Image (spheres, grey):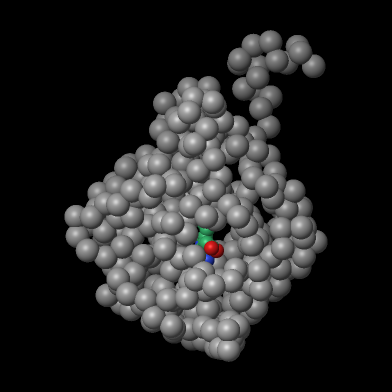
């Protein structure tokens, strides 16, 4: 085996998987106000941006050739029903239209969920302490339509309600948005790796956890059932999330279906690498590229990652 490993050129020739800039999706947190940039303590290098500052930051993303961004809204107000999620004057809707105005070719994907918008921090509408699935579906559909109206190119519902893809698809089609694809967070696990994201989005549940709607991390076969349901309901792209601890699930989804597979390198994965590299215990570039390559090897067609800008810079500089 070592004959093919002796020279860098040969190693490149036989390399099976390679991350490319076009595989990347950059998640960004947008909030209200102006000229505002607030660092997220548990995610060094990640900020909440007011829309004007987000546009400045996205200039980097666009010029590096990263094809898409995922917008997460941090709203100006929260209530029981998460009303701000569909408010046309809120950060996420304004960020959609401004981003499309400044960078028409940059694909804008929006997170369709309620946890950052409800005062209880759950991903839907509560009734007697439990999330009412079908009431939530109606709300999610309205949120999806408001994002589409604002100019989103693609919607990424992450709420894990039953039947959400079908409800949103029907709502979009009825309102003239039949061309907007759905990237479904199909296999989304109730993971401890989301902690830093919840610091960034102020979206921790005030009571309880998300285990009655997100998946049990022990279940691989159930992930396939989730993906199958979403595909049958009309999902265009299916996602596995988190990625690193669920590479087996990515592989199984890729082998079981023919749909494009997205994988989310989530906030906790980012925070772990940042913490270790800041201490000098790991080499950031080498470790990030190894992790990204493992996502590709497992079968991910696209990767959502807070490292997207760094990765694009490294790749554009063409170092090994
Ligand atoms: C919203 C949502 C979450 C993430 C993406 N969309 C958090 C959650 O479910 O609590 C997590 C992303 C990350 O950790 O980077 N439902």
Residue at x 49% of width, y 65% of height: 204
Residue 39 vs residue 139, the one in the foreground: 39
**Quadrant housing residue 313:** top left
Q: Residue at x 77, y 60 (%)?
A: 219
As drawn, the residue found furthest toward the left would be 35
Q: Is residue 43 above or below residue 187?
A: above
- Residue 59 at x, y percent in the picture: 29, 46
Quadrant of image for the N terminus: top right
20 shown above or below 130 = above
Image coords of residue 89 (percent x, y): 27, 75
Q: Residue 158: which quarter of the image?
A: bottom right
In x, y percent, where is residue 199? 44, 57
- In this rendering, the answer to whether 31 lies above or below 86 is above
The answer to whether residue 7 is seen in the rendering is yes
Picture residue at 26% right of the left edge, 59% below the top: 50
Q: Is residue 8 above or below residue 180?
A: above
Note whether residue 112 is visible. Answer: no
Residue 102 horizontal/vertical position (percent): 26, 56
> In terms of depth relative to the viewer, which is nearer, 94 or 177?
94
Q: Residue at x 46, y 65 (%)?
A: 203
């Amino acid at each position: 085996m070592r004959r093919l490993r002796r020279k860098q050129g040969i190693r490149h020739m036989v390399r099976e998987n390679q991350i490319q800039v076009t595989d990347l999706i950059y998640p960004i947190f947008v909030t209200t106000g102006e000229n505002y940039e607030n660092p997220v303590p548990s995610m060094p290098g990640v900020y909440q941006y007011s829309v004007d500052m987000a546009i400045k930051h996205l200039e980097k993303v666009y010029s590096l050739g990263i094809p898409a961004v995922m917008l997460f809204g941090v709203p100006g107000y929260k209530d029981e029903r998460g009303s701000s999620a569909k408010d046309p004057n809120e950060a996420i809707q304004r960020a959609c239209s401004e981003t499309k105005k400044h960078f028409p070719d940059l694909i804008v994907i929006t997170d369709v969920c309620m946890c950052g918008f409800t005062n209880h921090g759950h991903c839907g509408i509560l009734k007697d302490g439990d999330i009412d699935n079908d009431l939530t579906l109606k709300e999610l559909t309205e949120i999806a339509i408001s994002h589409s109206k604002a100019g989103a190119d693609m919607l990424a519902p992450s709420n894990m309600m039953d039947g959400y893809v079908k409800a949103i698809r029907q709502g979009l089609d009825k309102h003239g948005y039949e061309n907007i694809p759905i990237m479904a967070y199909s296999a989304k696990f109730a993971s401890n790796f989301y902690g830093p994201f919840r610091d960034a989005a102020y979206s921790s549940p005030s009571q309880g956890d998300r285990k009655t709607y997100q998946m049990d991390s022990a279940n691989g076969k159930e992930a396939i059932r989730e993906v199958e349901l979403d595909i049958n309901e009309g999902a265009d792209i299916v996602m596995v999330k988190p990625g690193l601890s669920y590479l087996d699930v990515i592989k199984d989804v890729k082998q079981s279906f023919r749909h494009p597979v997205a994988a989310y390198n989530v906030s906790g994965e980012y925070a772990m690498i940042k913490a270790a590299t800041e201490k000098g215990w790991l080499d950031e570039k080498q470790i990030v590229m190894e992790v990204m390559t493992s996502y590709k090897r497992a079968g991910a067609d696209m990767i959502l990652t807070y490292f997207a800008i760094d990765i694009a810079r490294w790749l554009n500089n063409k170092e090994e």
